[in-house]
Image (cartoon, grey):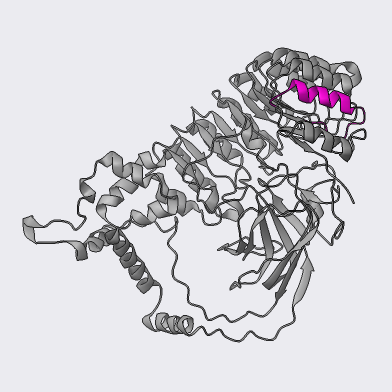
């Protein structure tokens, strides 16, 4: 181990000697050792609220309204200092661990860094670039989800194309569970950065929260003159620094060789005598940057670290801020056996191009079965065409919130006939494309069409699903505006294997037609059902679920006016596996009833939001 550390330290020294003069290094070192900081220039602090919401990964609201949408974060507070569930706030799509427990959830990727907690994000633009001195976030309901705040060097309002985009972490922390859901003003201590910014990114993780977190506004404070901080920073070696020159690899081993001539032997002890498979197992526990660094230490470990078997799964999402065409190029030769790839959040603002992406996919796509590309705004029609041509065995494709893809691009997905999981949440897919996909991708098990507002007739889609995808296990139709009882009846009659069905905020479904009771009778394997904000759900629907769906685990009936405590008690008695029941804004269910039912069924998380 000492040998490996010595090798790595030697490489760091070599790279530092290339990047700066000895005089610069000594000056910086003296500044650090003496603890001296240059005096900040006198400057007026600027306070500004977000001017515009630039990008986000998900939101609870609709694409066609302002209720619970991320766009509510622009401007001054709408709610603060009040606490509670308000439609004028920004709310992400999920909370807790409920979604990860579902059959539709993807398997986690190996090698995800322990310090990477982010599940969602939002990017905000401000009027004037400043050197940040403080960031304040107004959290009005269930605070504690923010895990990272970043600043970007690029001005989002400039007409010039972005060049040399840099992101710096201002603050990071672990997910927390605040003891009270009351509003607060979150202002963590941030670090100083060397460039002005008017683009902030908040990353969140709501997995520890008991309900949806709600954000109201964000303040950026800063000065226009640069604070002079004479702090020395060690050079960083990351996944973009993957040069494996023979000169370096040969020189690194020099100080540790013993003997001369043909009797020369290495100083690795018995490490290089370990079985190849055992070394591979040890290296499988390293993160990707650590694996890349270790590959530069000696020829033996270079061989092991570049073995394609180390790269059958590759999650580049944690490194979204640093990933570029060059990064993919360096990894390309190592990923010839790649099976699962996560590129979510990467490549935005021009750092990934069609050329770099296409080259990587052509070299590494043959064995690919899972491709996660949530929020990849570099994607265009040509990229989807490349995926359809180079990934013949693809089974999982996630294009969640790729809302800048043109509608015609989605027709290429129909060529991926082995697809089993397809996520198109918040995309611009249209009816022609989804019908083409359902015609050819008959092995689909999981389909997410949440907030796909350009699909004109969901009844036709439901009919096609019932005919072509009879093994469907989960279906997300969150906020589809035009599914009727006729389409729902046809869907559940044809797809009887459904375990998850999200019909939240589907206003055209009416309980009086008997569609919800027919749903319950047709889907005995149902484990998750969201009927969020359907005002017509009634006791007879709940009683039919209790009688026909004993495996039910998650039920959301937020906002119904016609469900009584008696029918809920019957449901809780008949569904012993139930763990989540949301009765927020159910007019007949008050907090007294919730407390009574929670006492009788302590294993069920019964949710009831409030508004002050």
Does 578 appear above or below 399? Answer: above
For the question of whether residue 486 can be seen, the reply is no
The quadrant of the picture occupied by the N terminus is bottom left
Q: Verify whether residue 560 appears in magenta.
A: yes
Residue positioned most to the left: 262
Q: Nearer the viewer, residue 537 or 580?
A: 580
Left or right of residue 67, residue 245 in this image:
left
Q: Nearer the viewer, residue 403 or 528?
A: 528
Q: Position of residue 377 (x, y in %)?
A: 63, 47
Left or right of residue 390, residue 229 in this image:
right
Left or right of residue 127, residue 355 in this image:
left
In percent of the image, x 62 and y 38: which residue is there? Answer: 399
In percent of the image, x 42 and y 62: which residue is there? Answer: 237
For the question of whether residue 435 can be seen, the reply is yes
Q: Nearer the viewer, residue 606 or 560?
A: 606
Q: Position of residue 147 (x, y in %)?
A: 64, 56
User: How many circles with numbers are drawn on the protein?
Assistant: 0
Q: Position of residue 156 (x, y in %)?
A: 69, 61
Q: Which residues are magenta?
A: 556-577
Q: Verify whether residue 154 appears in magenta.
A: no
Q: Position of residue 298 (x, y in %)?
A: 27, 56
In percent of the image, x 63 and y 45: which residue is there? Answer: 375
Q: Residue 182 appears in which quarter of the rendering?
A: bottom right
Left or right of residue 26, residue 261 in this image:
left
């Amino acid at each position: 181990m000492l040998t490996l550390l010595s090798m790595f330290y030697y490489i760091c020294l070599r790279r530092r000697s290339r990047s700066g003069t000895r005089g610069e290094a000594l000056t910086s070192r003296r500044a650090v050792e003496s603890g001296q900081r240059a005096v900040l220039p006198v400057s007026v602090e600027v306070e500004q609220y977000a001017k515009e919401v630039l990008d986000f990964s998900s939101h609870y609201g609709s694409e066609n309204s302002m209720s619970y949408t991320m766009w509510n974060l622009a401007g001054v507070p709408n709610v603060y200092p009040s606490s509670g569930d308000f439609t004028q706030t920004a709310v992400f799509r999920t909370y807790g661990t409920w979604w990860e427990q579902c059959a539709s959830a993807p398997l986690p990727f190996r090698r995800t860094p322990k310090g990477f907690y982010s599940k969602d994000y939002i990017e905000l633009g401000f009027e004037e670039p400043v050197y940040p001195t403080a960031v304040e976030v107004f959290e009005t309901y269930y605070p504690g989800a923010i895990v990272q705040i970043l600043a970007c060097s690029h001005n989002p309002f400039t007409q010039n194309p972005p060049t040399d985009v840099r992101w710096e972490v201002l603050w990071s922390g672990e997910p927390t569970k605040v003891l009270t859901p009351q509003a607060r003003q979150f202002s963590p201590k941030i670090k100083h950065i060397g460039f002005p910014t008017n683009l902030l990114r908040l990353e969140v993780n709501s997995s520890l929260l008991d309900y949806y977190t709600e954000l109201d506004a964000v303040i950026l404070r800063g000065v226009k003159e640069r604070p002079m901080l004479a702090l020395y920073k060690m050079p960083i070696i990351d996944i973009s620094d993957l040069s494996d020159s023979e000169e370096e690899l040969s020189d690194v081993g020099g100080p540790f060789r013993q003997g001369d001539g043909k009797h020369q032997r290495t100083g690795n002890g018995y490490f290089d005598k370990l079985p190849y498979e055992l070394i591979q197992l040890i290296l499988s526990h390293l993160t990707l940057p650590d694996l890349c660094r270790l590959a530069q230490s000696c020829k033996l470990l270079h061989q092991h670290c570049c073995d394609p078997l180390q790269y059958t799964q590759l999650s580049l999402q944690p490194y979204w801020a640093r990933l570029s065409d060059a990064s993919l190029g360096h990894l390309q030769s190592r990923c010839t056996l790649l099976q699962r790839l996560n590129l979510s959040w990467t490549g935005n603002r021009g750092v990934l191009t069609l050329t770099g992406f296409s080259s990587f996919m052509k070299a590494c796509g043959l064995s690919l079965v899972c491709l996660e590309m949530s929020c990849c705004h570099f994607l265009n029609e040509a990229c989807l065409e490349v995926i359809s041509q180079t990934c013949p065995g693809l089974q999982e494709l996630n294009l969640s919130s790729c809302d800048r893809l043109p509608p015609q691009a989605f027709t290429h997905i129909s060529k991926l006939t082995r697809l089993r999981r397809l996520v198109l949440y918040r995309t611009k897919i249209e009816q022609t494309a989804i019908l083409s996909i359902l015609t050819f991708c008959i092995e689909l098990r999981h389909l997410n069409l949440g907030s796909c507002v350009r699909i004109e007739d969901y009844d036709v889609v439901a009919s096609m699903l019932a005919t072509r995808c009879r093994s469907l296990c989960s279906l997300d139709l969150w906020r589809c505006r035009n599914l009727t009882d006729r389409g729902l009846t046809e869907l559940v009659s044809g797809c009887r294997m459904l375990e998850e069905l999200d019909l939240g905020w589907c206003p055209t479904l009416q309980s009086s037609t008997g569609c919800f009771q027919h749903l319950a009778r047709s889907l005995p394997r149902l484990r998750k059902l969201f009927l969020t904000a359907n005002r017509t759900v009634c006791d007879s629907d709940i009683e039919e679920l209790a009688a026909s769906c004993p495996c039910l685990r998650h039920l959301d009936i937020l906002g119904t006016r016609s469900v009584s405590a008696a029918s809920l008690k019957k449901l809780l008695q008949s569904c012993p596996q139930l763990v989540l029941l949301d009765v927020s804004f159910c007019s007949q269910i008050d907090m007294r009833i919730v407390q009574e039912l929670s006492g009788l069924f302590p294993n069920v998380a019964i949710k009831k939001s409030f508004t002050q």
